[in-house]
Image (cartoon, grey):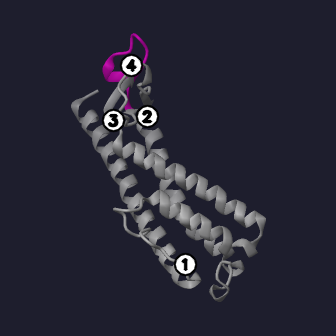
């Protein structure tokens, strides 16, 4: 492993983490826009949901999930199941982003190779430990190691998932309740 390999590894990691953060922020913004439109269309109050200092993305997703259950009810049980499955995955992606942004990273966090493999021939690994405040030895979470390609796949999966809400809502838009009927 040369110094350039390590610098490229670190640069690629930071670029991927930045993409995850950037796309998460765009996703959060789009969820807010959807809630704003739906609140006007269906006549419900948003309260502090669009204030990021008072309400995290988790609360906006929960509200959108609740609204979608009722708004898309005419589309049938299969459509609602698709939405619920998407919301489950969206919440996992939200939690992944939070863990990765607030956790502790080792870049590199280790090496993969046999006992007799020279370090220069080993694969670089990322090491990650989620943030927590209990530092007693028996409660320390184990370090998670992964390759840069595994991390890249997690980032790409999250970014792809963020765009799936619009595809799903467009698919079932023609069955959506009319705003004049509200959500009652």
- For the record, the magenta segment spans 112-127
Q: Tell me, for residue 137, which label it has, or none.
A: 4
Drawn side of residue 71 relative to residue 101, left or right: right
**Residue at 69% over, 61% down:** 82
- For disc 1, the marked residue is 44
Q: Are marks 4 and 2 in contact (CB under 8 Å)?
A: no
Front-most of residues 152 and 58:
58
The crowding category of the residue bearing disc 4, from other C-alpha atoms within 10 Å (few below 14, some 14 to 19, many at least 20), is few
Marks 1 and 4 sit apart, C-alpha to C-alpha, by 48 Å
Drawn side of residue 8 relative to residue 58, left or right: left
Q: Are marks 2 and 3 in contact (CB under 8 Å)?
A: no
Q: How many marks?
A: 4
Q: Nearer the viewer, mark 3 or mark 4?
A: 4
**Which sits earlier in the primary sequence, circle 3 or circle 4?**
3
Q: Nearer the viewer, mark 1 or mark 4?
A: 1
Marks 3 and 4 sit apart, C-alpha to C-alpha, by 19 Å
- For disc 3, the marked residue is 105
**Residue at 72% over, 78% down:** 175
**Which sits earlier in the primary sequence, circle 1 or circle 4?**
1
- For disc 2, the marked residue is 147
State the SS at label 4: helix
Which image quadrant for residue 21?
bottom left
The crowding category of the residue bearing disc 2, from other C-alpha atoms within 10 Å (few below 14, some 14 to 19, many at least 20), is some
């Amino acid at each position: 492993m040369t110094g350039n390999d390590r610098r490229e590894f670190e640069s690629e990691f930071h670029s991927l983490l930045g993409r995850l953060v950037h796309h998460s922020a765009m996703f959060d913004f789009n969820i807010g826009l959807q809630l704003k439109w739906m609140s006007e269309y269906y006549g419900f109050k948003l309260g502090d949901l669009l204030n990021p200092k008072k309400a995290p993305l988790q609360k906006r997703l929960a509200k959108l999930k609740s609204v979608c259950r009722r708004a898309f009810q005419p589309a049938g049980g299969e459509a609602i199941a698709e939405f619920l499955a998407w919301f489950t995955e969206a919440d996992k992606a939200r939690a992944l982003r939070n863990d990765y942004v607030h956790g502790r990273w080792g870049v590199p966090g280790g090496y993969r190779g046999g006992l007799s493999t020279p370090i220069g021939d080993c694969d670089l690994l990322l090491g990650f430990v989620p943030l927590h405040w209990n530092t007693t030895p028996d409660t320390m979470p184990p370090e998670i190691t992964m390759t840069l390609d595994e991390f890249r796949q997690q980032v790409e999966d999250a970014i792809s998932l963020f765009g799936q809400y619009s595809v799903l809502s467009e698919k079932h838009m023609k069955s959506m309740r009319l705003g004049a009927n509200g959500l009652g």
